Image (spheres, rainbow, N blue to C red):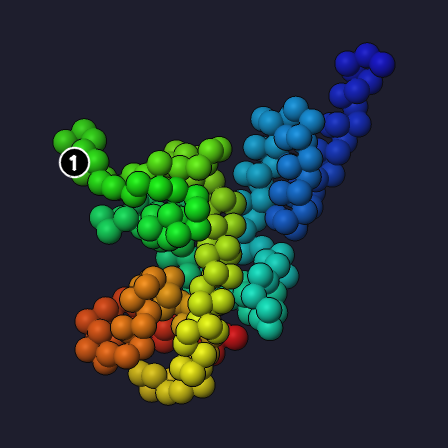
Amino acid sequence: MNATAQAGPLVEYVKRTLDLDDPEEIDRRADNLSGIGYARTADHLREKAALLRRSGAPASTYRSPIPGASDEQWARFARLMQTGELATITPSGQVGLFQTRLKRLEDLGLARGVRRENHHGGATWTATFRPPLTMDRLLADPIAQYRIFAASMKGYREDILGRHRAALGTTIEGQPATLSGLLAVAHHAGPALSSWLASQDDRRRFAKTTAAYHSATGVF
């Protein structure tokens, strides 16, 4: 079969994929194309999927990784947690759309040696990443950032149910604590979740974390 004959079905497949409005399905097809050697075409499809997510794709396209939370609830929670910019590293070592802490990537086994280094006269955060992930790829890829966020929330759910289950349903800062609220705190505070739960002073001192709790508790 000649190259022209082979290209025809591929072009039609890509066109049909670009007509879809489901980012998860577009990502799946991109992975298929990448696996058979069409990496650049796959990257183009992933850009389309990322654009759909950032432009308000239907909530059902977010598949909930949290048992008991519907796709719609998860989508609302994920959007509430999306408070950063794609290619940013904050002064405190948080990256990307979800401002995920680099230390959290270390917890998840995706990076090691989180540190600050001097670049062009200023200090910035970096780490040694597990291939194929790199800092440049992470900061350019909203899909990778979303998947890391989802994996992080799954891990924090296990921690909350194992260590802080008694806090669920109690009133904290005037609102009933639900799983989504405690996940929001864990996302911001990491291991300091225990201290935040125990100390009203901490809840006042870390106003951004407490604000995240107020916005997210009750979602699921």
Where residue 182 sits in the image (x, y, percent)? 41, 72
69 displayed left or right of 190: right
Where residue 142 sits in the image (x, y, percent)? 48, 45
Look at the image and tell me whether residue 123 can be seen.
yes
Q: What kind of residue is marked 1?
A: Gly
212 displayed left or right of 162: left
Q: Does 3 appear above or below 120?
A: above
**Does dot 1 land on a helix, a strand or a loop?**
strand
Question: Which residue appears farthest toward the left when viewing the image?
Answer: 121
Query: Which residue is rendered at x = 33% and y = 69% of the image?
Result: 193
Q: Does 84 appear above or below 13?
A: below
Between residue 147 and residue 40, name the one nearer to us: 147
In the rendered view of the protein, which quadrant contains the N terminus? top right
Q: Residues within 10 Å of mark 1 (few under 14, many from 20)?
A: few
Query: Which residue is rendered at x = 40% and y = 37% of the image?
Result: 129
Q: Does 197 appear above or below 145?
A: below
- Toward which corner of the image does residue 11 lie, by quadrant? top right
Where residue 210 sits in the image (x, y, percent)? 30, 72
Where residue 85 sits in the image (x, y, percent)? 37, 48
Query: Which residue is rendered at x = 48% and y = 61% of the image?
Result: 155
Query: Which residue is rendered at x = 45% and y = 64% of the image?
Result: 156
Q: Mark 1 points at which residue?
A: 122
Between residue 124 and residue 193, name the one nearer to us: 193
